[in-house]
Image (tube, rainbow, N blue to C red):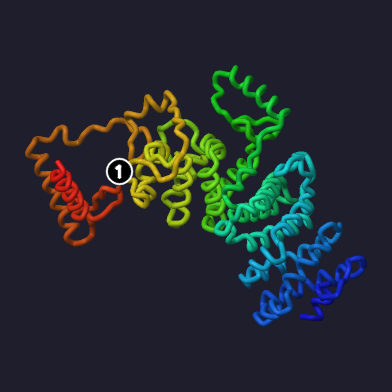
Amino acid sequence: MQILLRLAKLSDLDDSLEKVSEFPVIVESLKCLCNIVFNSQMAQQLSLELNLAAKLCNLLRKCKDRKFINDIKCFDLRLLFLLSLLHTDIRSQLRYELQGLPLLTQILESAFSIKWTDEYESAIDHNGPPLSPQETDCAIEALKALFNVTVDSWKVHKESDSHQFRVMAAVLRHCLLIVGPSEDKTEELHSNAVNLLSNVPVSCLDVLICPLTHEETSQEATTLDELASDKTAEKETVLKNNTMVYNGMNMEAIHVLLSFMEKRIDKGSSYREGLTPVLSLLTECSRAHRNIRKFLKDQVLPPLRDVTNRPEVGSTVRNKLVRLMTHVDLGVKQIAAEFLFVLCKERVDSLLKYTGYGNAAGLLAARGLLAGGRGDNWYSEDEDTDTEEYKNAKPNINLITGHLEEPMPNPIDEMTEEQKEYEAMKLVNMLDKLSREELLKPMGLKPDGTITPLEEALNQYSVIEETSSDTD
C-alpha cells in the first residue's frame, strides 16, 4: 500500500505533477489501489489509518487547474468514491474537514468548462461539441463521489450551506443541458446528476429554473403574440431558439428531467433503481416550487379533450404514469401516484378526473382520502379550466374507469318486484357466505377517511351520532 501510495503521488512528500513521463505510472498505481481497496477489508482499514481520503483530496487540488491529466483525476475520484462508499465515517470527514463539497463541485466545473453569466447561471452553447469521453468519465466519477458526500445533507442542511448547494445545483443544471460522446454516456451522466439532485435541499432547487434575460423576454413576448393570433394556441409553454419557456422562466432543465423520466418508463425494467429517483425528484420540485409544478402539469396533464379511452390506454406521459399506478412494485406505484397527486395540488376530484377512481384507490386509501377532500400541503387556489369537450362528456364518464361509456341498458328494468327481491337476497347470501368463510371481508370508511372492517366503522359512526344527540 505504501509503495503504491508513493508511486501514485499520494505520499506525504510534496510531490509535484511536472513530469509527464510519470503520469502512466500514477494512473496504474491508482487503478491498483482501487482494486485492492474494493476487494480487501484489511486495505480498507489501512486506508483509514493512512488518512488516504486527505491524500486523494490533495492530489485533486494539484490536478484541478491542469490539462491532459483527466485519467489521474478520474481514478483519484473513483478511489474517493469507493472509500466514501465503504466507510461512512469518511463521508463526514470529506464534507467538513476536507471541504470535499466545494472541491468536487470545482472538479465538475472544470470538466464541463463552465462559464458563469450570473451567480447561479452558466452559459449554455447548444451548438457546441459534446463532452470528450475522458471529461465524461471524470464528471461521472465526481458525481458519484459527491453523492456519497451529500447523502444525508437534506437532514442536516444549514443556511450557511445554502450558497454551496445552490452552486452545485447550478452545475447540475448545466450537466443536464449538455451531452456526452454517445447516447449511453449521456444517459449515464444525467442519471448520476439526477441521483445527486435528490440529495440537494429542495429549497435550493429553484436554480434549476431561471428568469429569461431581457433579450429572451422580448423574443418570448413576440412568440406569445404570434400564438395569441392563432385561435388554436392555448398553451403557455413555448419553444423559442431551443429554449423551453414557461411564464417567463427557462424550463430547459425540467424538460430534460421529464424526458429522462419518460425514457426510463419506456425501458420497462429496473423501475425501482432507474425510475424512482427522477420521479421522486420531480415530485419534490413540484411540491416546493409553483412554477415547476405548473409547467409539469401543463406537460403531463394538459386539459382533457378526448375521454373515450381509459386513462391508462395510450402513449402519452399521462397514460404511462397512470399505468404505473397499478404496478406490482409497491414503491414504484406509490411514487407515480404521488407525483400525479401533487400535480393535481393534492385535490382528490382533480386526480380522479385524470386517472379514474380505480387507478387512484390505492393512494387514496393510504392517505385516508377515499371519501374525497385534499392532502395536507397548501397550494395556490388557481382553478383548473375544463375544456368544452370534457364538460359535455362529464355526465357520461364512468368515475371508476375514468373514461366515457355509452349508456348501458339496466338489466333490472324488465324484472318484476319479486325477481328483484329474489336476486337481491341471492346476492346477500353469497356475500354472507364469503364473509363467514373469510374469503371476503366487508370494509367501511371511518370518519377520518381510512378503511376499516365494516363492523368497526359502523360502531364509530354510532358513537358519533350518540355524542351529537347528547350535545343537542
Mark 1 crowdedness (10 Å alpha carbons): few <14, some 14-19, many ≥20? some
Q: Quadrant of residue 54?
A: bottom right
Residue marked by disc 1: 371
Q: Position of residue 310 (x, y in %)?
A: 40, 38
Q: Position of residue 209 (x, y in %)?
A: 63, 40
For residue 147, above or below residue 469: below
Q: Quadrant of residue 357?
A: top left
Q: Name the residue located 46 percent from the left edge and 49 percent from the top edge.
A: 324
Q: Nearer the viewer, residue 14 or 251?
A: 14
Q: Name the residue located 82 percent from the left edge and 75 percent from the top edge.
A: 12
Q: Quadrant of residue 227?
A: top right
In the rendered image, the residue lying farthest to the bottom is: 42
In the rendered image, the residue lying farthest to the top is: 229
Q: Name the residue located 57 percent from the left edge and 49 percent from the top edge.
A: 202
Q: Nearer the viewer, residue 469 or 375?
A: 469
For residue 417, above or below residue 199: above
Q: Position of residue 121 (x, y in %)?
A: 71, 42
Looking at the image, how many numbered discs can be counted on the residues?
1
What's under tag 1, amino acid-wise?
A: Ala
The answer to whether 305 appears left or right of 465 in the picture is: right
Work out whether residue 102 can be spotted: yes
Q: Name the residue located 55 percent from the left edge and 21 percent from the top edge.
A: 232
